[in-house]
Amino acid sequence: MTEKKAMPASGWNFDNSYAELPDSFFTRQDADPVRSPELVLLNEPLAALMGLHVQAMKSGEATSVFAGNEIPEGALPLAQAYAGHQFGHFTMLGDGRAILLGEQITPSGERLDVQLKGSGRTAYSRGGDGRAALGPMLREYIISEAMHGLGIPTTRSLAVVTTGEPVIRETALPGAVLTRVAASHLRVGTFQYVRNWCSVHDLRTLADYAWQRHYSDADSGDNRYLSLLQEVMKRQAQLIAKWQLVGFIHGVMNTDNMTISGETIDYGPCAFMDAFDPKTVFSSIDLQGRYAYGNQPYIAAWNLARLAEALLPILHEDEDQAIALAEDVISKFTDLYHGYWLSGMRAKLGIFNEEAEDEGLIKNLLSMMQKHGADYTNTFRALTLDRWEEMDWFDTPEFEQWQVQWQARLERQEQSRDLSRQLMRSSNPAVIPRNHRVEEALEAAVEQGDYSVLKQLLAVLSQPYAYTPEQDEYAAMPEPSSRPYRTFCGT
């Protein structure tokens, strides 16, 4: 057992509401100690937001906590049980290499899960070693913080420590533990697990907990559990629209990777799209393109249908009526998502009001972008900055015709051109975590122990809408390559 040790002046303020749920929802378990932990990244702004004392978080005692060697006062470590459809196939899962320390209550009263990822074997490891390699942990840190900068709901990364121990994958790799912070780790897969292996009473208990934790300010109406399904669907529709608007591809949208809170979680084979193409896939294991960029809204609807199935026993005592209620809710997802996406695309083009022809204008632009292999982010960046020389295909007759239509559309709204430009600047990031820049930062850190490249990248990505001259080099496209960019699971 790891040692439980108080950390005065650290700022830890744990509560453990999840541990008060039925015992079948989790297994009480400490992390496995590591040989020689070393703190390599600390998210100081996040630490301060959480009410943690930054200098104390740089101490050896805090490093021991981030590594799982010590347990801070008030924490109650456990591994959560859940299930999930992985590439369409249902299976029992659970935290196979993660430990939930507890819930930090921040100075503002917010409740945040604090989880150690890569902290050793658990009851749900299924033969795995429970460890994580440094590269994937740093990758999650970079992408999750980039998503936060973009204004997209996401889990966040508080710290990364190296363990001083190798992990064996194809080769021996340096080990690491990531400290992840989330509104909660409740997933669609959590409900699937309870529906399949626990009682209806337990299912109702979980739903009540999820409602109280994430939706207590919403109107529960006559049927709280139906309202829960509606609220989760609304947040997921908003989330997926935000992904699409910045060209983010999650890569592994299994039901265990869809949160009840509406946060992005589990940054495995994720990446940002360069050339616009709805069929874009980066994950090396997504051979059929199930989780391609263009499929993400459809997969979200499919996952929500699985949540609805899990909730059926508490939606209505009559199964046929429960199914009818669930189907009515899920049938609204497509229009809900489309509304959020269309509103976001209008903003990317500086459009404030609505006209029936807007969708055609947007789709014509996207069609041209796909035809010319245009970079998604830099196209909208060039439109925002009026840098027509940056895109060769802007000289084509079809784009010039589209531009005339776009300018005419802007003239028909009350807002000034200056306001339109401001709207575009706040809706179109000047920079994203370009895949080659992420790989460059990871290589320097993992292979050379040089974290300066990574930290500079994080600084640039923290203000993606700033449009500073320093960001120009980070907006540049990678050199042409004969091999498509591929990402791999491992986080």
Image (spheres, rainbow, N blue to C red):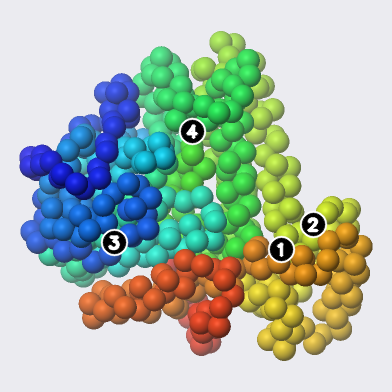
Question: In this rendering, does residue 91 appear at all?
Answer: no
How far apart, in angstroms, are the residues tagged by discs 1 and 4? 30 Å
Residue 123 location in percent, x, y?
A: 21, 37
Instruction: Judge whether 144 appears above or below 314 on screen.
Output: below
Instruction: Name the residue that disc number 3 marks.
Output: 42
Instruction: Judge whether 479 appears above or below 91 on screen.
Output: below
Q: Earlier in the sequence, mark 2 or mark 3?
A: 3
Would you identify the image quadrant in which residue 99 lies? top left
At x 20%, y 35%, the residue is 74
Which is more foreground, mark 4 or mark 2? 2
Give the tally of numbered discs: 4
Q: Three-letter amino acid code at disc 1?
A: Leu
Q: Three-letter amino acid code at disc 4?
A: His
Instruction: Name the residue that disc number 4 marks.
Output: 214
Residue 483 location in percent, x, y?
A: 48, 80
How far apart, in angstroms, are the residues tagged by discs 3 and 1? 33 Å
Discs 2, 1 touching: Cβ within 8 Å: yes
